[in-house]
Every structure is written in structure tokens, then in C-alpha cells.
Image: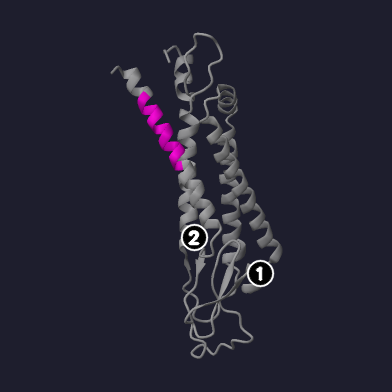
Amino acid sequence: MSSDQCTLLAGRILFRVGQLLLAIGIFMTILGMSTSHWVVRPNVNYSTHKIQANSTLVTQNFGLFIACRQSEYGQSRGQCGSIWENTNFVSKDTVRFIQFLSVVAGILFVVGVALEIVQLLPISKYRNFLAENRLVEMFSGIGTVVMLTSMVIFAGEVKNKAERVSGQEDEKSGWSFIVALMGLTMCVLGLVLVTMLRDLPIKKAGQKGGTWLRVASRASGQRA
């Protein structure tokens, strides 16, 4: 096998790895943002900390859309609902804006996956148009940026400002946040591989197809 063939094979394998990373990353990001364990607080003893269950709201865990209270006896999770109703000193408008950004990111991710599926169909007209205009990369990339923006706002305006009761100082990031962060990291890595290694459409008869990397090398005098 020649060096050109090895390079071509390695590029195709890495491209498939990029597709896989992007798909898994999108799934993990959507899973993380739709669950309620972004922030987890320790259970507190109402009697020890002199907490009045009827007048004090004790939040046990919350995410981008849902927050859950601690039950009075701390044995199980209490009532769950909207963040602004189950946490103290959180702006309803800010939470709605974060949720709006998250929904937009989710829609962009779904569109990106749908377009990637279309590119797998044996219809060169659609495949070439999508590849030439980088629509999958555009939708997925914008979705990643929007989701990162919502996470930054969440950390600054919700996580840090939501009131804690005595005994909850040692709050931790929950599995939902970790899954979402890992998903976004995989999205970024997948986008890099897919963008650099996706086959570009053939525009002229007798011209070899290539990727951004191989087209760049051909332009400098090397064969594709």
C-alpha cells in the first residue's frame, strides 16, 4: 500500500471517528441539559440547623430546567419543579434566557445530525451541496457555542447566586453537568476532525476529490 493510500485510509478512519464523537457528544449534551443534577447539595438535618420546613426552602439538586427540594426528613427527594420556584434568589428572566439558549442549542444539534444523515444517502446532489457549504459543521458548531454560553451564564447567575441554607456549603457538580461538559468536549473534537477530513465535492471532470487538508497540499504543488 502506497503512502498516498495510507494517508487516504487514515483520513477516512479519522473522519468516521469524528462523526462518532460528534454524534455521541450531541447525545450526551442533550442528556445532560435535560436532567436535574447539575448542582447537588448535601442533605441537611432540619432539627440540627434549626430549619423551619414551612418557611425555608431547601434545594437538594437542580439543573437547567428542573430543581428539586429536600424532603423535611431528608430521606428522599421532595418536590421538583421549575428552578425559580424551588430555589431562592434566582431571577426568573435569567433562567428563562438560559433555557431558551439551551433549547436553541438542542435544535441546532438535531438539525446537524439530520443533515449528517442526509449526507450518508446515495444522492450526490444533496451530499455535495451540504459538504461544500459545511452545513453540518455550521449548525453543530453554532449549537456548541450557544450551549457553552448558556453554561457560563448558568454558572455565574444561577449556581453562584442560588441561596444555600446552613450545612449546604459543600455543594458539588452533579453527573448531569459532567455528562454535558464531556459531551461538549467530544463535540469540539468531532467538529475539528469532520471539518478537516470531510470529502469535498468534485467540481470538474477528471478532478480528484479531497478534503480541506489535501486540497491545501495540492494547491501548493503536491498531488491529491
Side (left or right) of 3 relative to 200 = left
Q: At 55% across and 80% down in the image, what residue appears?
A: 165
For the residues marked 1 and 2, what is the alpha-carbon distance in whole angstroms? 19 Å
The residue under label 1 is which amino acid type?
Trp
Under circle 1, the secondary element is: helix
Would you say the magenta stretch is mainly helix, strand or loop? helix
Front residue of 10 and 159:
10
Name the image quarter holding residue 18. Answer: top left
Q: Residue furthest left?
A: 1
Q: At 57% across and 35% down in the image, what residue appears?
A: 115
Under circle 2, the secondary element is: helix
Q: Label 2: which residue?
A: 176
| Label disc, if present, on residue 84 of the rendered structure | 1
Classify 160 as above or below 129: below
The numbered mark, 1 or 2, whose residue comes first in the sequence reads 1
Classify 87 as above or below 74: above
Residue 190: image x %, image y %?
46, 39
Magenta highlight on residue 154: no
Q: At 36% across and 28% down in the image, what residue appears?
A: 10
Residue 224: image x %, image y %?
43, 15
Magenta highlight on residue 13: yes
Residue 223: image x %, image y %?
42, 12
Name the image quarter holding residue 15. Answer: top left
Residue 219: image x %, image y %?
49, 15
The residue under label 2 is which amino acid type?
Ser
Q: Residue furthest front?
A: 122
Q: Which residues are magenta?
A: 9-21
